[in-house]
Amino acid sequence: MNLNLDFAAILERWPAFLEGALLTFQLAFIATVLGTIIGVLGAIGRRSSYPVVARICGIYVEAIRNTPLLVQIFLVYFGLASLGLKFSAFTVAAAALTINVGAYTTEIIRAGFDAIPRGQIEAAEGLALSRAQIYWHVVMMPAIEKVYPALTSQFVLLMLASSVTSQISAEELTAVANYIQSDTYRAFETYILVALAYIVLSLIMRAVFWLLGLVIFPRRRRLGTPL
Amino acid sequence: MHKITRTDTASPVVGVSNVHKSFGALKVLDGVSFDVNRGEVLVLIGRSGSGKSTALRCIDRFETIDSGEIVVCGHRVSGPKLDLRALRQDVGIVFQSYNLFPHLTIEENITLAPCSVKGISKVQAKEQARRVLAQVGLEDKLHQYPEQLSGGQQQRAAIARSLAMQPKVMLFDEVTSALDPELTGEVLKVIEALAADGMTMVMVTHEMGFARGIANRVVFMHRGKIHETGPAAILTSPATPELAQFVGTGL
Ligand SMILES: Nc1ncnc2c1ncn2[C@@H]1O[C@H](COP(=O)(O)OP(=O)(O)OP(=O)(O)O)[C@@H](O)[C@H]1O
Ligand SMILES: [Mg+2]
């Protein structure tokens, strides 16, 4: 058995790789931003005093957490198609990933909300802050600070999981790889490079989240407590 | 406006009359009445579970009452049309567990409510933060985070945070119970200074020596009722055997 690796033919295709990586990054970016918004709203919803709202948010979270991502992607893809709506594969992929990560984010942020001691809220109420002000200043910010590591891991996982959107031909990194390997017959080499590309993307995301953490949470920066 | 101010001066700052309150089957307040006039310090004492905290919390509507009436700074606390946030602008409350907001600096803790509730400018609020912190002897802690302060300092910062809202009455619920004796002293000094400045206060405390020094009136609660009340002197010469026993063990 001799291992015969030849990267030349694949490295020639670097622009395609780069484009795929950029698309993966865009998918991750969109899903992270929208997922955070959904997560915050979902977490508020799950704690709502209206049982219907809390229930709907709960069902959303459970439905997503108990079905495979690929099936969710197909559901969005064929669901939109059967409604006669035509969207690009990219849009469908972004939508499905957002819906998916929104559910996980909801759960994580809710755990953060639940970790805020009752006394904090009473102190804020005693200072005559409104409900919205309390949510923003006293619940949300410290809660997100608490769950920030869990949250960012989730977003990195999401970026990696976005590779399954190649199944609906979103032209992201894995789809590009599938295409190149079938073109060059250099499957192993192709996926080695793709794996490296995902590692680089992960590291970039982690670095960005780390910097963002320093900006959003000055206490962490000032006291040097690791996130 | 002028008229309201005048009736304010005439009537007590806090008026509690015949208040009843149960948690389920447990009767916690059983016909409690007391008044606190402007500049007065009322001290609530009694055994654990006698209803002191509940009585105090009813004043700021952290608990609702079953019957009776509570009027605070002209707000009918027990009424259906209470403007809760207006009430809480007039009342400052400090708890045993300081409850500073951990992610904010001391300055941010103090300026948060004046800026977002009263809408005063950041500059003005910071100015005021410096003033109230000086009042509690913590001017140098402006830019520290709560976790960098000792328990006593955190409690003083919590008092400063309340003061920044310029309340008309302050409520203290066992604010030194979590502190060791040395730190207790520095917090009590701050409260004494407030009393000397004429702040109207209602406080629950187990510090009998302190109560004797500061109270204009002492209310001894026992089984949800006011068992004995009078000037601070009742702590040294109690009329009822229950209070005698309580101060006997409390000292
Ligand atoms: N939210 C609540 N639900 C049910 N029972 C309560 C609640 N709050 C207080 N109680 C009960 O009411 C009684 C009076 O409580 P309260 O906290 O007013 O006592 P206290 O005099 O402040 O005691 P301590 O000195 O221990 O603080 C206690 O038996 C307590 O268990
Ligand atoms: Mg108590």
Image (cartoon, coloured by chain):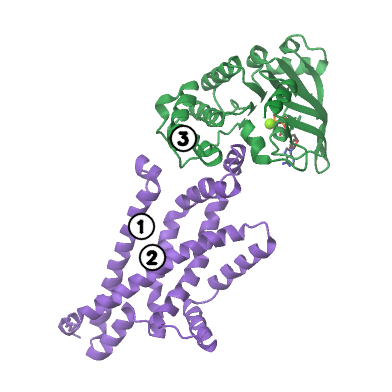
Tell me which label, 1 or 2, sits earlier in the chain: 2
Does residue A206 sit above or below A25 in this rendering? above
Residue at point 38%, 85% (across, down): A169
Quadrant containing the C terminus of chain B is top right
| Secondary structure of the residue carrying numbered label 3 | helix
Q: Distance between the Cα atoms at labels 1 and 3?
A: 25 Å
Chain that is purple in the image: A
Rendering coords of residue B213 (x, y %)? 64, 12
> What colour do you see for chain B?
green
Considering every residue shown, the one lying at the far left of the view is A8
* Chain bearing mark 1: A
Q: Residues within 10 Å of mark 1 (few under 14, many from 20)?
A: some
Task: Give the residue at mark 2.
Answer: A156
Q: Distance between the Cα atoms at labels 1 and 2?
A: 10 Å
* Relative to A34, A19 lies left or right: left
Query: Residue B146: which numbered mark, if any?
Result: 3
Q: Dots 1 and 2: beta carbons under 8 Å?
A: yes
Residue type pointed to by label 1: Phe
Rendering coords of residue A121 (x, y %)? 59, 43
Does residue A113 sit above or below A157 in this rendering? above
Single out the mark in the foreground, 1 or 2: 1
Residue at point 52%, 49% (across, down): A136
Residue type pointed to by label 2: Val
Query: Residue A209: which numbered mark, if any?
Result: 1
Quadrant containing the N terminus of chain B is top right
* Relative to B5, A65 lies left or right: left
Rendering coords of residue A10 (x, y %)? 20, 82
Residue at point 56%, 62% (across, down): A42
